[in-house]
Amino acid sequence: MSVFVNGNAIFNAARQGHYAVGAFNTNNLEWTRAILKAAQETNTPVLIQVSMGAAKYMGDYKLVKKLVEEEMRVMNITVPVIMHLDHGNYEAAKECIEAGYSSVMFDGHDLPFEENLEKTAEIVKLAHAKGISVEAEVGSIGGEEDGIVGEGELASVEEAKQIAALGVDYLACGIGNIHGPYPENWKGLHFDRLQEIADAIDTPLVLHGGSGIPQEQIEKAIKMGISKVNINTENQLAFAAATRKYIEAGKDQEGKGYDPRKLLAPGSEAIVDTVKEIIGWLGTPEVK
Ligand code: 13P
C-alpha cells in the first residue's frame, strides 16, 4: 500500500472550496524534511514535487520517492502527501508512473499542440489505470527551470478545453506567470484569461512560478479557480539568506559550527517558516 495519496480529491475540493494546496519542490534531504514538517505542523495536505533536474541531482526518481516515503515514516507524518513529478517529459512521466508516484505532470507545452494532446492522452491512460493523477500544461510558463525554457505565451481557452476533455486532473496554464524571481517590469497575472479558462472548464487550475507573486494576486487567482500553487524559488532564497547570515556571523567557525547538522539548520528552519507562511496565504484548511 502506498503511503501517498493522489491529487484528485484534494484539488477538486480545493477548486470547489476556493482555496489552494501548495506544491513545494524538493531539492534534497533538508528540503524534504522541512516541507513535511511544515505540513504536519499546520495539519494540512501537501504536494511534494521533484523536477527532472532535481531528481537527477539526488539520484533518480525512485530514490526521491523512497526518501519522501521514509522521511514520512520516521517523522510520523499523518497529513496526506502527494508525490508528484514536476514538468516531466514523456519518458520521465512514464518512469514515475512505474516508480509509484501518486501524481505526474506531463509538460508537452513545447510540442506542437496535436502532439501535446496525443501524448497527454497516453499518459492519462497509463496513470489513471494505476490511480495516479495527471497535470498537463497549456500555454507556457515564462522563465527557465532546469533547462526548460518557456516563452511565457498565454494559454488558449480552446486548447485548455481540449486538454481538459482528456480527463487530466489539474491543468497548468500560462497566464503571465514566470519561474524564478519576477522582473521589476512584470505586468502581473492575466486575470482576464484566467477567468475565461475558469469559466470554460471545471478542472482545478495550477499556478506555476508562485514565488514572488504578490499575496493579493495569489489570493485573487485562487478565488477564480487556481487550486495548486507551485513554489520553489521562495524556499531557495529563504534557505540561502539564512545560511548566509549564519556564515557571515562567523558561526561556522565557533566550536563545531561547521558540522552540516548545524550549518544547514537555520536554512532548513527558514524553509519550514516559508512553507507555513505560504500555506496560510493559500487558505489550505486543516485535515479533519
Ligand atoms: P518558482 O521557482 O518560481 O516558485 O516556480 C516553481 C514552479 O513553478 C515549479 O514548477
Image (cartoon, rainbow, N blue to C red):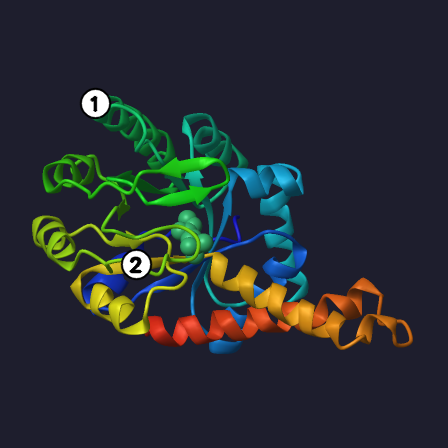
Query: Residue sitting at 60 percent across and 58 percent down?
Result: 32
> In the rendering, which numbered label is found on residue 246?
none
As rendered, which of 36 and 265 lies closer to the eye?
265
Q: Does the rendering let one see residue 164?
A: yes
Mark 1 Cβ and ligand 1 under 8 Å apart: no
Horizontally, residue 133 falls left or right of residue 234, namely: left
User: Pointer 2: what residue?
Assistant: 185
Label 2: state its secondary structure. Answer: loop
Tell me what residue is drawn at x 53 percent, y 77 percent: 41
Give how far across and how far down residue 7 sits, in percent.
36, 53
> Residue at (31%, 65%) from the top-left corner?
20
Question: Considering only vertical position in the picture, is 139 above or below 24?
Answer: above
- Image quadrant in which you'd find residue 141: top left
| Kind of residue sitting beneath label 1 | Glu
Using the image as rendered, state which of residue 70 and residue 18 is in the foreground. 18
* Nearest to viewer (mark 2 / mark 1): 2
Badges 2 and 1: C-beta atoms under 8 Å apart? no
For label 1, the residue is: 114
Residue 276 on image: x %, y %: 48, 74
Q: Is residue 224 left or right of residue 121?
A: left
Q: Answer above or below: position of 172 versus 16.
A: above
Image x and y of residue 269, in percent? 62, 73
Residue 111 locus on image (x, y percent):
30, 25
Q: CA distance from mark 2 to mark 1?
A: 34 Å
As drawn, the residue found furthest toward the right would be 255
Question: For the residue carrying disc 2, how many other residues have a C-alpha within 10 Å: few (<14), some (14-19), or many (20+)?
Answer: few
Name the image quarter holding the C terminus.
bottom left
Q: Quadrant of residue 243?
A: bottom right
- Label 1 neighbourhood size at 10 Å, few (<14), some (14-19), many (20+)? few
Q: Is residue 72 visible?
A: no
Q: Amino acid at mark 2?
A: Asn
Is 67 on the left-hand or right-hand side of 246?
A: left
